[in-house]
Image: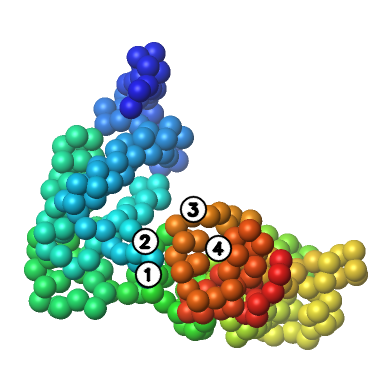
Amino acid sequence: MGFGRRWRGWVMECISTCSMSMLINGSPSKLFKMERGLRQRDPLSPFLFVLVVDILHRMIGEAVRNWCISPLMVGRDQIELSHLQFADDTVLFCPPEEDTIKNYRRLLRCFQLMSGLSINFDKSSLIPINCDEQWVQRMCGVLGCKQANLPVKYLGIWLGANPRLVKTWKPLIDKVEEKLSLWKAKILNKTGKLVLIKSVLNSLPVYYMSLYKMPKAVAEKLISLQRRFLWSKKDEKSGMALIKWEVVQAPKKLGGLGVGDAMIRNSALLFKWWWRINDRGLWVLGWARLDMEFSVEERTVPIGIGSSKSASPHYEAGQT
């Protein structure tokens, strides 16, 4: 890839000379040398992995250009989509063609021999969309993987699920309830509870809220859990609210407690997408093909159609 000998030597020194110890019953063991590359969670590991998977990206691109692999054609503008990569996760796309799937299998085998990375097909899945069941089972046998159906969890988000349904947010609500069940409300005063709400409970839904418009019912459920935790008595039974929840949410400079409004925080997190719009972005190309008011230059908020409501802070047309 064009790296000089000195740079490669530095990397090899980092890999070949490092040593580590293990905690056994809370005490570190003697140091021993690493024989299988970098240790787990080594800060150098993700950088080396990105360099390696870039080869896979180039191999897939070359296979598409040589018509060995047929990409998935998206939208009426026929946007080619063959793969998406994020860190150590790779998603491959293709039409229901047996030759393309077999060529994908051969390409992955070549990448495995070149890089030394072993692809675990037992942890991989074939996700069909409107495909014949018998054909899907046969392709799973070709790839040596299992079948999965939408919705599937990818990078912490359920793909194929409707974010406007409350059940899509149920894992998040369960996570908040699990946190609350671990905390001993009876030994915490109001100040301690307030700190936990701000630092922990408010941060749990941030990832979901940065991608989807939160349904009002979900926001009300989260507020209900926070309110019950804050005003609960020492016997963990529901207590009487001392002030209105609007005052709890209000900023401190306005006389509130600074917990914040989940719906307003959700809109603020979604607005960050307008700063990331560019003409060549894949998600912009896929979004702009829909029949809606969309302008990259003027940052026009689109009228929600299909899944566009999920990323639009407001459903009506407007100007940011």
| Of the image marks 2 and 3, the number of the one nearer the N terminus | 2
- Of badges 4 and 1, nearer the viewer stands 1
| Of the image marks 4 and 3, the number of the one nearer the N terminus | 4
Report the Cα–Cα distance between label 2 and label 1.
7 Å
Report the Cα–Cα distance between label 4 and label 3.
25 Å
Q: Where does label 2 land, which residue?
A: 79
Report the Cα–Cα distance between label 2 and label 4.
28 Å
Q: How is the image coloured?
A: rainbow
Name the kind of residue labelled 4 in the image: Tyr
Q: Residue at x 35, y 23 (%)?
A: 2
On the question of residue 153 being in view, the answer is no
Seen from the viewer's position, the closer of residues 1 and 169 is 1
The crowd level at tag 2 (other Cα within 10 Å; few <14, some 14-19, many 20+) is some
The crowd level at tag 3 (other Cα within 10 Å; few <14, some 14-19, many 20+) is few
Residue 280: assigned label: 3
Report the Cα–Cα distance between label 1 and label 3.
16 Å
Name the kind of residue labelled 2 in the image: Ile
Residue 40: assigned label: none
The crowd level at tag 4 (other Cα within 10 Å; few <14, some 14-19, many 20+) is some
Q: Residue at x 19, y 47 (%)?
A: 66
| Of the image marks 1 and 3, the number of the one nearer the N terminus | 1
Report the Cα–Cα distance between label 2 and label 3.
12 Å
On the question of residue 146 being in view, the answer is yes
In the rendered image of this protein, does residue 83 appear above or below residue 233? above
Name the kind of residue labelled 3 in the image: Arg
